[in-house]
Amino acid sequence: MINGKDKLLTIGQFAAMHGINKKTLMWYDEIGLFKPAVIHPENGYRCYSYRQSPVLETILLLRELDVSVSEIQDFMKNRSADRLKYLLEEKTADLDRQIAHLQAVRTLLWTHRENMDALLSMDLSEISVIQKEERCLITVDISRDTSFEQEVELITAETEKYRLGRLHKASYGSMISVDSLLRGNFDNYTRLFIEIPFLPYQTGLHITPGGTYLRVFHKGDWKQLPNRYKEILAYAENHQLTLHGFSYETGINENVIDRIEDYIVRIEIPVLG
């Protein structure tokens, strides 16, 4: 307990106690948001009571949560536990969304960093066996007849549906079934995918299996991709690996190249095991 709760504090003392500038208190007084306990009749000095501290701290908390001044003014006119509870729940939900956004951005930054690390150290001829966790993808169906313009429209529609706002908030790629590869149909792409960090499971999403994958990189013109897939299939056969599901292709260096000849695709295919 603090003694002297009824003792008046100068505006400077009260502002310092709450870690704010005294001009903030003066502004709050001018707009009628938070009035001093006493205004000295002779010199006009503002004085505050310690008992006003909880009210000011509530205002400062709401401001920190980006509640508008007009909303706080409205709340202060009719303060109640119910109204404060509603405001805090609303702003907590906003804060949770911001945290999720920042986590997603951090994941994307880390992914880009890993891609750059890979670019600096990768052996493009290597075929490696890796482990991956299950993940959820948004997919759109395409065919050989789907034009590039139509693909853009399909992807744009999905980004709007999931409120991505900007393309950098997700990773994009294409899918071709292992069955098509085994039949030699190396251009039979059937889906495009969008991977959003922390996307929760929802009905209709494509689930990539967790477990063992073959990972391969291809540099250069897409016309040479069939040759790379032939190497992958030969490797799998020689090592008695059974590929299944889809091959997932993702470009990893679009943001650091100018020529298509330098384009690098990461190819990942699940292995039964």
Image (spheres, rainbow, N blue to C red):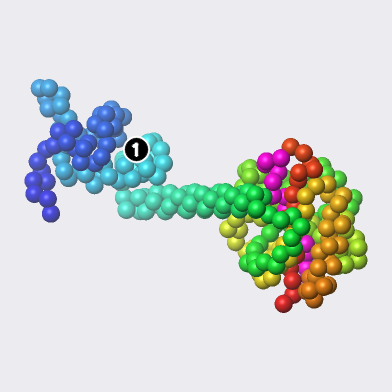
Q: In the shown orientation, is residue 237 left or right of residue 250?
A: right
69 or 230, nearer to the observer: 230
Amino acid marked by disc 1 = Gln
Magenta segment, which residues?
Answer: 244-257
Q: In the shown orientation, is residue 233 left or right of residue 61?
A: right
Kind of element beneath mark 1: helix
141 or 222, nearer to the observer: 222
| 248 part of magenta stretch | yes
Q: Quadrant of residue 206?
A: bottom right
Q: Residue at x 67, y 41 (%)?
A: 255
Residue 272 appears at what percent x and percent y?
Answer: 74, 75
Q: Residues within 10 Å of mark 1 (few under 14, many from 20)?
A: some
Residue 156 appears at what percent x and percent y?
Answer: 72, 45
Q: Which residue is disc 1 drawn over?
A: 73
**The N terminus, quarter of image:** bottom left
Q: Residue at x 74, y 63 (%)?
A: 127
Number of marks:
1
Q: In the shown orientation, is residue 33 left or right of residue 118?
A: left
